[in-house]
Amino acid sequence: MTLLQANLAIALLAAHVLADFVFQTEKGVEAKKRVWVLGVHCLVASTLSYLFSGLWSVWPILLVVFATHVVMDFIKRRYMSPTLRSFLIDQAVHLAVIGALIVAVPYITDPVSRGYWYDEVSVHFYRWLLGLAGFLMATYAGAVLVGLAIRPLQPQTARDAVTDGTNGLPVVKSSLEGFPQGGRTIGLLERGLIFVFVAAGQPVAIGFLIAAKSILRFGEVGRGAARKDVEYIIIGTLLSFFIAVVVSYLTRLGFREYGVTWPAS
């Protein structure tokens, strides 16, 4: 892979993560049933891809990303249910488009060019962008992946919790609820911390994070939480940790392939 292709891969990946997982909220996903909302999302994804690439003469990047987002999001909304399988198919298609652009772009631009940001601004631009993309994948993309993976378990645990309760007594629903978005915020923080630990070359600290959260979570058993609720929480926690560790080390591998030692020794 040439430096041009490496920079383009980082640019397109960062743009995709920002457009799909940061700038697009859950309400935005639902609102994409409206044509203008879908159009804005696709425009954001294509514009970011074009801007991050820094290849001003390669305007087909803008058109290809916009068109593929429109087609894929339309198909997903029309024919696919919001499941983990649909999510993985959607992401696989977007990654395939990114891969195709990485292969095709060198044939339609000056192969010596490495992008405006690299040539004119800073040789470190794409290194920072790679780090940002990795962090956002671990945190925000990880949140979506965990949520979809454990969603099939939610209806059953919620129904059992409301009807069974401790010692056979019914449980008031409000007593089962935490802070709004509390679980999501905790997940973002724990995955962000894991990414930072790996970046700092201190993966051992992940063990202390797991131990601390395990103590808090197993305390739910002592307070009479239903076993299914506890298992649901543990499954989500372990999956969250797994995603964060995998993405962190993949980002580290990306830096190594880019010719950067990360973390610094």
Image (cartoon, rainbow, N blue to C red):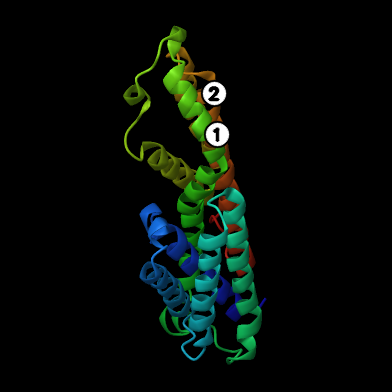
Q: Residue at x 41, y 75 (%)?
A: 43
Q: Residue at x 52, y 78 (%)?
A: 67
The x and y percentages for residue 75 are 55, 65
Q: Nearer the viewer, residue 253 or 262?
A: 253
In this view, 249 is above or below 187: below
The kind of residue tagged 2 is: Lys
Mark number, residue 186: none
Left-right relation of 4 to 56? right
The residue wearing badge 2 is 228
Q: Residue at x 46, y 56 (%)?
A: 136
Q: Nearer the viewer, residue 143 or 190?
A: 143
Do tag 2 and tag 1 residues touch (Cβ < 8 Å)? yes
In this view, 166 is above or below 155: above
> What is the secondary structure assignment of the residue under circle 1?
helix
Q: Quadrant of the C terminus?
A: bottom right
The kind of residue tagged 1 is: Leu
Q: Quadrant of the N terminus?
A: bottom right
Q: Nearer the viewer, residue 71 or 139?
A: 71
Residue at mark 2 to residue at mark 1: CA–CA distance: 9 Å
Residue 23 sits in quarter: bottom left
Residue 214 seen anywhere in this rendered image of the structure: no
Disc 1: CA contacts within 10 A as few (<14), some (14-19) or many (>=20): some
Q: Residue at x 49, y 88 (%)?
A: 59
The x and y percentages for residue 177 are 35, 29
Mark number, residue 153: 1
Q: Earlier in the sequence, mark 2 or mark 1?
A: 1
